Amino acid sequence: MRRRELPAAMISPVHVDLPLQPVLELLGVFVGALSGGLAAVRKGFDIFGIVVLAWVAGLGGGILRDVLIGAIPPVGIAQWQFVATACAAGLVTWAAHPGLHRLRRLVLVLDAGALALFTVVGTIKALEYGVGATAAVFAGIVTGVGGGVLRDLLTGEVPAVLHQRQLYAIPSLVGALALAVLWREDALSEGTVVAAVVGVLGVRLVALRFGWQAPGPWDRTTARVRLARVGGVGRTGRSGRVAREQPAPLLRWVARVRRSRAAGRAAGEGRQSTGGPDAGGPHAGGPDAGGRPGGS
């Protein structure tokens, strides 16, 4: 009887380790906890709240995974090395959060690495517990994105993985599926596991570099415009022209700032030429730089 035909309880556990896996796992926990600590700082939490949110963000995905597959007690509360690493990341964030904001790009790269590592480790651990391929895929995704979801819920935000359209959960899903297929085909080895980590990491980094996003709600007009741009086809409006696609929120914000500055300069030149007093018009104070466009 082939492996794919065996019930989950009869499947022999797999044992595949990544090179330097304990060190990489601790690094992933530390980076994930940094994201939780920074979210707590933005919300004005005290030191205890920062450490708790760092622990949740760094180990929440692993705790959810272990509860789902029956690995009790979860590693997030049973292994002091992981708990100490997450709490240390919270203390580092509390003491040095201005410097961490300046290292935002590095933190994003490390976070992508943590996503790839957690997805692969979570999927393999589920396979080791004999839960089957389908459950292992869900366990891998939960391990990769669960900490961020819990972090956002505790700070009163909609989980970013659900609404910001970033390619975050999708690379995790692809990596977990690839590992499940390899396991069903008896091709799971250290080499294929490392390739899965590199693949998830590469997709996430490329998406960050080029601004790739998951598709939003279906918009027929926008789809026609994009099809016309790519292939030169598509329906036109009453005027015979293809409807113009609305710019992204960031582009609208930049255009508004430029118009406001141009109006302010024009008003200042007009006052200088006429010699009149400074009237302090609506554009005298410049644009409101406090607003931040929505994103991801």
Image (tube, grey):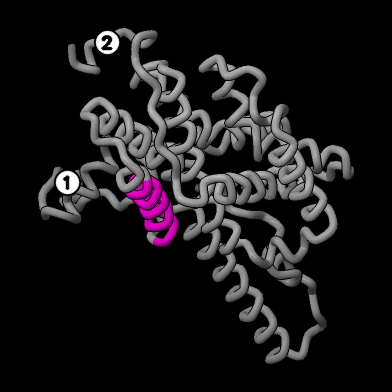
Q: Is residue 18 above or below residue 258?
A: above
Residue 142 image point, x, y percent: 51, 28
Task: Specify start and end residues of the magenta stretch as a single range.
Answer: 194-209
The answer, for residue 168, to whether it is visible in the render is yes
* Residue at image point 72% right, 46% down: 85
Q: Secondary structure at mark 2?
A: loop
Q: Position of residue 72 (x, y in %)?
A: 63, 17
Lateral position of residue 4 relative to residue 163, left or right: left
**On the image, numbered disc 2 is attached to which residue?**
6
Q: Looking at the image, which residue is at 76% across and 90% down?
A: 275
Query: Which amino acid type is shown beneath numbered disc 1?
Result: Thr
- Of residue 229 and residue 159, the one placed in the foreground of this image is 159
Residue toward you, 184 or 235: 184
Of badges 2 and 1, nearer the viewer stands: 2
Residue count near mark 1 (Cα–Cα under 10 Å), binned few <14, some 14–19, many ≥20: few
- Is residue 204 part of the magenta span, yes or no? yes
Q: Whole-percent x and y of residue 225? A: 23, 48
Comes first in the chain, label 2 or label 1: 2
Residue shown at 42% from the left, 61% from the top: 209
On the image, numbered disc 1 is attached to which residue?
A: 236
Q: Main secondary structure of the magenta part?
A: helix
Type of the residue with mark 2: Leu
Crowd rating for badge 2 (residues with CA inside 10 Å; few <14, some 14–19, many 20+): few
Q: Quadrant of residue 97?
A: bottom right
User: With respect to residue 77, does 67 lie above or below?
Assistant: above
Q: Magenta segment: does it hold 97?
A: no
The answer to whether residue 152 of the structure is visible from this angle is no
In the image, is residue 238 above or below residue 105? above
